[in-house]
Image (tube, grey):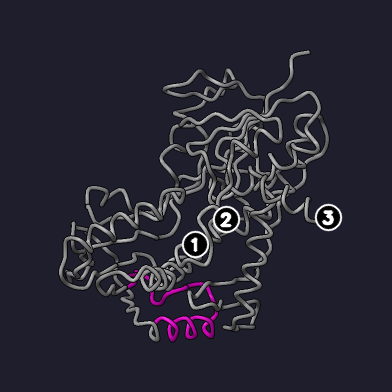
């Protein structure tokens, strides 16, 4: 009997869980093929801490080749340029088409609007995260060499990610002992940073930013980015040798090439079973998909919570059985790295900014990512055996 082929397009949080499950409990009569543009996956929750020197770079990365080898899966490093839904194939410009019986798409998102300013030498989009730190360091080194004044860094976008990057960037600069001072300013079109968090948390974040010398410009959309400046919609111009683009999530260009129904923002439209409304063989998870009946913000916590539902539903689809619905929770624990050995915690009406909050965040993050890091799991098993 010819085996069926389960294909994972993009190995983000949710699809990586499928590879991990496959290691001990593969789906009978199926082969697993993983497709990625990059040889590693980056855990977003540890990116700011890695920037700030709290973690080594390899601690936030998942070696996809090692993960796939251990699971007996095939890894293909290539970029898709479409789907042939009639034939059931993933298409490429520089690789043979790959047939699928079920396909899970988890290619993430990109920061909204970055492509309008891509020609500016100062621009450093936060994604792809696999290369963000390298690109940022290269730009910082260039500005340090070129200017005799303080380097000015602008962060466009006022979400939690921007706050964490701003605070951990200051820690990074202190640790690197950069030859000239670096100033940081956040620009957001919203009325405040960290929109969506409680007012108590927002006020605490504002005080933390002010205490670290991070300025915040609110209510202004950035309309133009030059090589050493940016402009806002009111016509104001600000010097900035480095512009980190960390706005809200937008659909990556590849989703337009897949001939699948999307929501009004370009993300794949799915049912509550995470299946595409166009083709039930296709699943879309994490930022890549939007559950039309119950859309949620594009946040990593939802991608993680989708893991068991996706695993169950893929098995049910390929082997036969009933599907489970993904019902996202209305609230969840939020932990924000403040780059000073502390984290800000928000859960319900509770807000705290303490060192123990950072230890809790670190424990959660390391526990999650270590599940996919083959060498670390081997080391842990050896320690337990001894």
Q: Is residue 254 above or below residue 120?
A: above
Q: Which residue is mark 2?
A: 59
Q: Residue furthest front?
A: 386
Res. 15 image quadrant: top right
| Residues at marks 1 and 3, CA–CA distance in whole angstroms | 31 Å
Q: Is residue 278 above or below residue 269?
A: above
- Mark 1 or 3: the one toward you: 3
Residue at 64 percent across and 80 percent down: it is 356
Which tag, 3 or 2, sits closer to the chain's start?
2
Residue span colored magenta: 185-209
Mark 1 vs 3: CB contact within 8 A: no
Using residue 191 as the reference point, say whether residue 288 is left or right of it: right
Using residue 4 as the reference point, say whether residue 246 is left or right of it: left
At mark 1, the secondary structure is helix
State the quadrant of the N terminus.
Answer: top right
At mark 3, the secondary structure is loop
Mark 1 vs 2: CB contact within 8 A: yes
The x, y position of residue 328, in whole percent, is: 67, 58
Q: Is residue 207 magenta?
A: yes
The x, y position of residue 282, in whole percent, is: 62, 33
Q: Residues within 10 Å of mark 2 (few under 14, many from 20)?
A: some
Residue at 24 percent across and 69 percent down: it is 151
Mark 3 vs 2: CB contact within 8 A: no
| Nearer to the camera, 74 or 255 | 74
At mark 2, the secondary structure is helix
Q: Which residue is mark 3?
A: 386
């Amino acid at each position: 009997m010819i085996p069926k082929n389960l294909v994972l397009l993009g190995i983000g949080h949710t699809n990586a869980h499928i590879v991990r499950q496959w290691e001990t409990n593969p789906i009978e009569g199926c082969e697993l093929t993983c497709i990625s543009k990059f040889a590693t996956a980056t855990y977003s929750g540890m990116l700011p801490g890695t920037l700030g020197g709290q973690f080594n770079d390899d601690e936030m990365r998942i070696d996809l080749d090692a993960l796939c080898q251990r699971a007996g899966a095939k890894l293909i490093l290539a970029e898709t340029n479409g789907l042939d839904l009639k034939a059931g194939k993933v298409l490429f410009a520089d690789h043979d088409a790959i047939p699928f019986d079920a396909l899970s798409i988890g290619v993430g998102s990109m920061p909204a609007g970055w492509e309008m300013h891509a020609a500016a030498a100062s621009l450093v989009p936060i994604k792809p995260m696999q290369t963000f730190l390298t690109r940022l360091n290269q730009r910082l080194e260039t500005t340090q060499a070129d200017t005799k004044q303080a380097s000015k860094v602008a962060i466009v976008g006022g979400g939690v990610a921007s706050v964490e990057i701003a605070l951990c960037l200051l820690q990074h600069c202190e640790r690197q002992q950069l030859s000239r001072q670096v100033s940081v300013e956040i620009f957001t079109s919203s009325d405040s940073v960290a929109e969506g968090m409680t007012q108590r948390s927002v006020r605490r974040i504002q005080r933390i930013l002010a205490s670290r010398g991070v300025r915040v410009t609110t209510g202004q959309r950035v309309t133009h980015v030059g090589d050493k400046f940016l402009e806002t919609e009111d016509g104001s111009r600000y010097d900035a040798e480095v512009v980190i683009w960390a706005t809200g999530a937008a659909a990556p260009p590849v989703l337009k090439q897949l001939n699948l129904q999307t929501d009004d923002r370009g993300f794949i439209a799915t049912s509550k079973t995470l299946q595409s409304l166009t083709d039930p063989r296709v699943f879309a998870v994490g930022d890549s998909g939007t559950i039309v009946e119950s859309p949620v913000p594009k946040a990593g916590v939802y991608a993680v919570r989708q893991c068991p539902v996706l695993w169950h539903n893929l098995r049910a689809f390929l082997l036969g059985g009933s599907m489970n619905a993904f019902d996202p929770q209305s609230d969840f624990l939020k932990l924000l790295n403040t780059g000073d050995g502390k984290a800000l915690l928000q859960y319900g009406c509770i807000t705290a900014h303490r060192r123990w909050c950072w230890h809790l965040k670190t424990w959660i993050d390391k526990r999650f990512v270590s599940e996919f890091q083959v060498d670390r799991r081997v080391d842990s098993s050896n320690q337990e055996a001894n």
